[in-house]
């Protein structure tokens, strides 16, 4: 690693490794929070239904019991994308993720107890 990287890059570790250090097994994870779907490929995180050509296999879900919590508008949005937005969404990766793997929400939702004053 060069001097710039040493001063600016901070590696925090991979998700599964961090969870393992906390004693959390992937099968214990119930929800994944997704603030947006563009530039996201959730197929490696959630259960998929078939072989994916780009991966050369049917991916094993990192979190086999999890649902992706995502705004309802974000799920509906790709149906009416402007042509310049289409490259940002990888909708082909979602055709293998069953609809029940998503938990649509609308607006602000309290997901757990908050901290602070």
Image: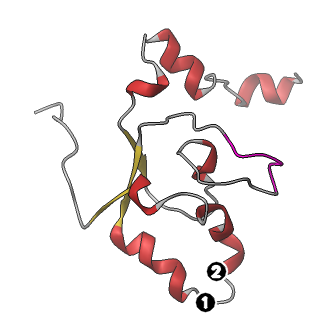
Secondary element type, mark 1: loop
User: Residue furthest toward the front?
Assistant: 50
- The numbered dot on residue 61 is none
Image x and y of residue 111, in percent = 22, 44
Please name the residue that numbered disc 2 is placed on.
85
Question: Quick one: label 1, few (<14), some, or many (20+) residues within 10 Å?
Answer: few
Is residue 55 within the magenta segment? Answer: yes
Q: Are marks 2 and 1 in contact (CB under 8 Å)?
A: yes
- From what the image shows, is residue 12 above or below residue 102? above
Question: Residue 41 vs residue 2: left or right?
Answer: left
Is residue 78 within the magenta segment? Answer: no
Question: Residue 59 vs residue 15: left or right?
Answer: right
If the image is split into quadrants, where does the C terminus sit? top left
Q: CA distance from mark 2 to mark 1?
A: 5 Å
Secondary element type, mark 2: loop
Question: Residue 84 vs residue 34: left or right?
Answer: right
Q: Main secondary structure of the magenta part?
A: loop
If the image is split into quadrants, where does the N terminus sit? top right
- From what the image shows, is residue 116 above or below residue 96? above
**Residue 93 in sight in this render:** yes
Q: Which residues are magenta?
A: 54-59
- From what the image shows, is residue 114 above or below residue 12? below
Question: Residue 54 vs residue 77: left or right?
Answer: right
Please name the residue that numbered disc 1 is placed on.
82
| Residue at 63% from the left image edge and 70% from the top image edge | 91
Locate residue 41: give its quadrant.
bottom right
Locate residue 100: give its quadrant.
bottom left
């Amino acid at each position: 690693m060069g001097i710039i990287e040493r001063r600016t890059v901070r590696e925090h570790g991979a998700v599964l490794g961090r969870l393992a250090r906390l004693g959390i097994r992937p099968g214990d994870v119930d929800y994944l929070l997704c603030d947006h779907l563009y530039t996201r490929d959730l197929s490696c995180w959630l259960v998929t239904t078939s072989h994916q050509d780009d991966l050369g296999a049917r991916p094993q879900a990192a979190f086999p019991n999890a649902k992706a919590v995502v705004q309802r508008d974000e799920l509906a949005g790709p149906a009416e994308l402007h042509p310049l937005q289409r490259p940002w969404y990888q909708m082909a990766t979602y055709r293998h993720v069953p609809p029940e793997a998503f938990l649509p929400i609308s607006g602000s939702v309290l997901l757990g107890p908050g901290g602070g004053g």
